[in-house]
Image (spheres, rainbow, N blue to C red):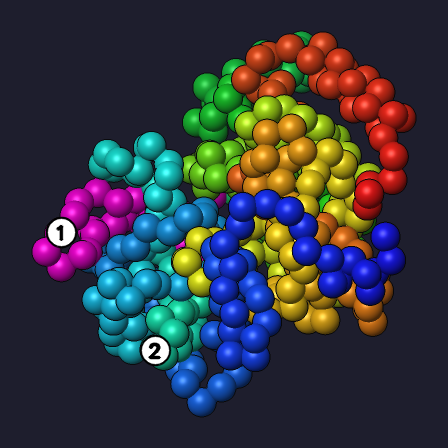
Amino acid sequence: MEQEEFLNHEPDGNHEFDENEQGIRRDAAHRFDYALRLNEDRENYENQARLVDYGTNWFPICGVSAVCFPEQQLPMKFHDDEREIYDRLVESARANGFVVLFPLDIEECNALPYIATLSKVVQSNPQTLSMELMGVNRCKVIAYNLERGEAQIQLLPEVEVPSILSQYVPRYVKNSSIHKQRELAYRITGYPFHILREITTNHVEECCRELDRMIGSDAVIAAKNRGLVYFSYFVAQQIFSNRKTEYSLLKESSANSRLAAALKYCKVSIGKCSNCNTPIFRNEHIMRLPDQTMTHVNAHGYVHKITLLSEVMNYVRASPPSYDFTWFPDYAWIIIECSNCDQHIGWEYISMIREPPRFFGIQREGIKFQNDEEHENGSPEESTNSQAIFEEISEGEDELSE
């Protein structure tokens, strides 16, 4: 189907649409929020407060549909009936205060204590009840004050366990198993080498190689040069998995263990529908765009973390194309669903004037990754069978666009 014809195409389906002031039809459940563009209503905050001045204290707390890592930017959008929460967060921002963020759908956050992220408000727009926050530090929520909407938190240290194994292991055990060496090093130094995987330069370089093609070598090198702690959070943001896995990485007590746990997700090879396990993409289809943003929020306040792909299979289009409030300028978006079970898996983007003319944005919560299955089933044979199934289906598919 030609692009111009497709842009005017009206797909079948029981979707509700409304019209904006220009008469352009759009999906009523998919209005993207661009309220934080530069405009006169936006307020910026220069938060100069130092965490060492606060220690354990009370801060406003807010649940979000995402995991926020330190130094990660997170957009937020509030409903009209949530203005009280919005005003409370803005008041904290104006006072050089902080905001505690926690993921709403993580069961562990229903009971104290639990791990969260201390953040600061960077900018806000009172006309649209939207704001952007920046993660600052991991923290532990230890108490609530429900009347004030605040939580008492304890800051958590950022730990990088040095590679001192070779310095503290006697020569007579050099030829012993790595497990024995770590056990002995733990007894001598107190460092938990018996449970931590030792992070070496080779591990870091392996992460760099896996991420280079997706986000570019310049960004990866810059992150690596900022140290192991920052790099571990950087890798955790780039992996292909859901909030449950991301939260498990936020809880890791050291940069070493966080990077070791995230490394396997840099190598995921198959993405499947999280509802019915239908194959959707392979990792060689992952792509990048200049200045791309991985985290977006829609008008309903739901945060989406997306992965960009050049090709997707086993999908159907579920909305007409629209340029209205697109996340990617000059690209029209189309909602796409799993062709087998109709679960929302992301969006197709097309443009008449940009390169590439088409790509896909897959929302991570709609995808189950091969590594998740291996973790759940403990069976390496599963991944081999999955790869064979994917290749078999791929050979029988027509063009992806049809």
Give, as a three-letter code, the residue at label 1: Leu
Residue 19 vertical position relative to residue 366 in the rendered view, above or below: below
In the image: residue 69, left or right of residue 234: left
Please state the horizontal and vertical placement of residue 289, each as a whole percent of the image: 75, 60
Please state the horizontal and vertical placement of residue 373, each as a whole percent of the image: 60, 21
Give, as a three-letter code, the residue at label 2: Pro
Magenta: main secondary structure: strand
Rendered residue at 82%/45% (across/down): 401
Toward the viewer: 46 or 213?
213
Q: Quadrant of residue 85?
A: bottom left
Residue under numbered circle 2: 126
Rendered residue at 23%/59% (across/down): 59
The residue mark sitting in front, 1 or 2, is 2
- Please state the extent of the stretch shown in magenta in the rendering: 133-159
Toward the viewer: 282 or 252?
282
Toward the viewer: 62 or 361?
361
- The earlier-in-sequence mark between 1 and 2 is 2
Please state the horizontal and vertical placement of residue 241, each as a whole percent of the image: 58, 37
Residue 169 in view, yes or no: no
Q: Secondary structure at mark 1?
A: loop
Residue under numbered circle 1: 146
Rendered residue at 83%/71% (across/down): 353
Residue 42 vertical position relative to residue 182 in the rendered view, above or below: below
